[in-house]
Image: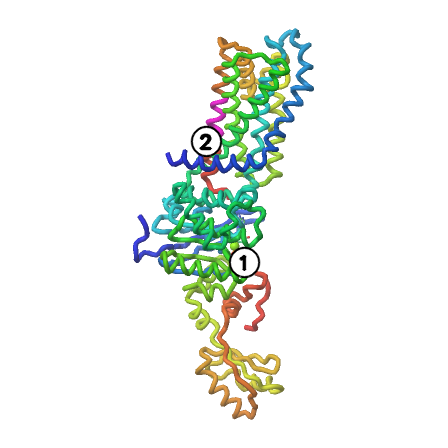
Amino acid sequence: MAAQTNQPMVEARGLGRTFRTRTGAVEAVAGVDFAIQAREVVGFLGPNGAGKTTTQRMLSTLLAPTSGEATVAGCDLRRDPVGVRRRIGYVAQGGSTNPNALCDEELVLQAQLYGLGAEEARRRADEICARLDLGDLGARQIKTLSGGQRRRLDVALGLVHGPGLVFLDEPSTGLDPQSRANLWTHIRGLRDELGTTVFLTTHYLEEADALCDRILIIDHGRIVAEGTPDQLKRRISGDLVIFTVGPEAERARGVLAGRPGVREAVPHDGTVRVTVERGEEGALPLMRALDAAGIPVASMQIARPTLDDVFLTLTGHSLRDQPAAEGRRPS
Amino acid sequence: MSAWREARLVFRQQLRLSWRQPVWAVLALIQPLLYLALFGPLLRPLTHTPGFPPGSSWSVFVPGLLIQLAMFGTMFVGFGLIAEMRYGVVERMRVTPASRMALLMGRVMRDAVVLVGQAVLLIAIATVFGLRAPLLGLAAVLVIVLLLGISLSSFSYAAGLKLRSEDALAQLLNSLAVPLLLLSGILLPMSLAPRWLYLLSRLNPFSHVVDGARAAVRGDFGSGSIAVGFIVALALAVAGVAVGTRTFHRESN
Ligand SMILES: Nc1ncnc2c1ncn2[C@@H]1O[C@H](COP(=O)(O)OP(=O)(O)OP(=O)(O)O)[C@@H](O)[C@H]1O
Ligand SMILES: [Mg+2]
């Protein structure tokens, strides 16, 4: 049974995985609950080791969960793994090709393993190659491809059979800006033209921002936030209002800190950076307060926080930092 | 019947990959050929020793070599699977709906085909050295070799999948290979052995397979050895495929 219209494409209920290692148990995913609707492009963000790959491997039947359950593309993950496999595509984080094989061979074989006939498989392989700019590489041995070309082949292998739901684990790692833009176009096309549901992990915040309808943020095996890119930015960090006040920065901080609506005021390099709920409404009263205190304001700027700021606020570390790094932002 | 189709797809891809590097299949023949040329002649004076099986020294030695080829030619295929796992190829196939047994059997079939090809070549060369054997006997030996190859390549894949490390697999195989070889009577027939060693060798299934192969090459179709050898080889093949499929079924960590 394919997914019904109103049923989520992916529904995880307390889905968790604990690895046993020599040094003890590692709780990679600590019982997550979330749902992905049909035709959604959902981004999965989190620092290294947060549990993104483990979650995707469980949902794609590669790894048995140690707790919880999930429904994927209308099939129960534990009871009907073959049904799940039939309906999904999966692109692994770490590559998926034999260096001695030819591109064509791998693509056609993969499509045939999904049950397509030889001719149809051939046709789909050519089509996906054209879409992902692999057109003239078909007869090449994979070990002769560049890293980015190989990554595009990985993506092509996960999509060649035209699945209704795809899991992409860092699909754009190692791609140049043009290939990445091309991949984005392709992913949007999958959703808009074919109604494909996409669940992708990424470390590129601009990618999540530009491509995803919704974002899930995971840290230490727990979902710490979810929402549209805008919602997340607004809800978690508020806006940043930056006043350029020269040598008066420290005094400006004293004036602004503690005023209603101000979460935080930090002097920084001739400016004072104030975090407020909504910048458009919050800025003017602050400006007047500075005026009243006799502090001349040379310029004022309202900045929406980036997802990177969201991240910092939520997890205490930046997405680009090492997982254990201290948060840079005073809290 | 889709499993059979999937196995054939994997088989064809694996065969293409092997074909692209034929040097390995040929190199695997060098060792048995060296045994044939440098060890075989040592057996000739032994043919009159009490306990030495009937027949020419070649008809005693070549069947042993064929079984050795079957064992050592396929025992190490698990290394290739570990490489494929590292490339992510195994995971890419496991995420498709293809039957797990097909993913295993496609590879096993490739190994079996390569092995039978090598065995035919080895028999041809042994004929030049002086081996004389009935065609039916040679066909029976090839069937036994095929079954053994299926068994050992399946076991090797299961071990590779389970251990996921070349070092661990090498240790396992080395610790198994030497006792299995010494207790199989491949190099010298166990009928020469003292009683305790002979009895010990009976515990090794490969010794029965070797006896069966010798009886076949000798053309001794009346004795039960061929049937015993065949049944043991068949049982090993069934066990190997069962264990291999089970291991492919279970997620491996
Ligand atoms: N096979 C395994 N055995 C033991 N621990 C594991 C295993 N696989 C993953 N882990 C641990 O589980 C945690 C989550 O790993 P996972 O690969 O899901 O992270 P991730 O979010 O994908 O990170 P990255 O951004 O680096 O890809 C990590 O602490 C990792 O070390
Ligand atoms: Mg990962």
- Taken as a whole, is the magenta stretch helix, strand or loop? helix
Asked which secondary structure carries label 2, the reply is helix
What segment carries the magenta color? Answer: B233-242
- Front one among A266 and A305: A305
3D distance between C-alphas at marks 2 and 1: 43 Å
Return the x and y of residue A220 as percentages of the image width and height.
Answer: 51, 58
**Which mark is drawn over residue B26?**
none
Return the x and y of residue B151 as percentages of the image width and height.
Answer: 51, 28
Label 2 crowd bin: few (<14), some (14–19), many (20+), radius 10 Å: some
- The chain ID associated with circle 2 is B
Is residue A205 visible in the rendered image? The answer is yes
Asked which secondary structure carries label 1, the reply is loop
Q: Which residue is labeled 2 in the image? A: B242
> Against A328, is A72 above or below?
above
- Front one among B206 and B153: B153
Image quarter hosting the C terminus of chain A = bottom right
- Find residue A118 and report its image quarter: top left
> Against A318, is A221 above or below?
above
Q: Nearer the viewer, mark 2 or mark 1?
A: 1
Three-letter code, disc 1? Leu
> Against A110, is B195 above or below?
above
Three-letter code, disc 2? Ala
Q: Is residue B239 magenta?
A: yes
Label 1 crowd bin: few (<14), some (14–19), many (20+), radius 10 Å: some
Return the x and y of residue A231 as percentages of the image width and height.
Answer: 42, 70
Q: Is residue A241 magenta?
A: no
> Against B114, is A302 above or below?
below
Is residue A51 visible in the rendered image? The answer is no
Q: Which residue is labeled 1 in the image? A: A175
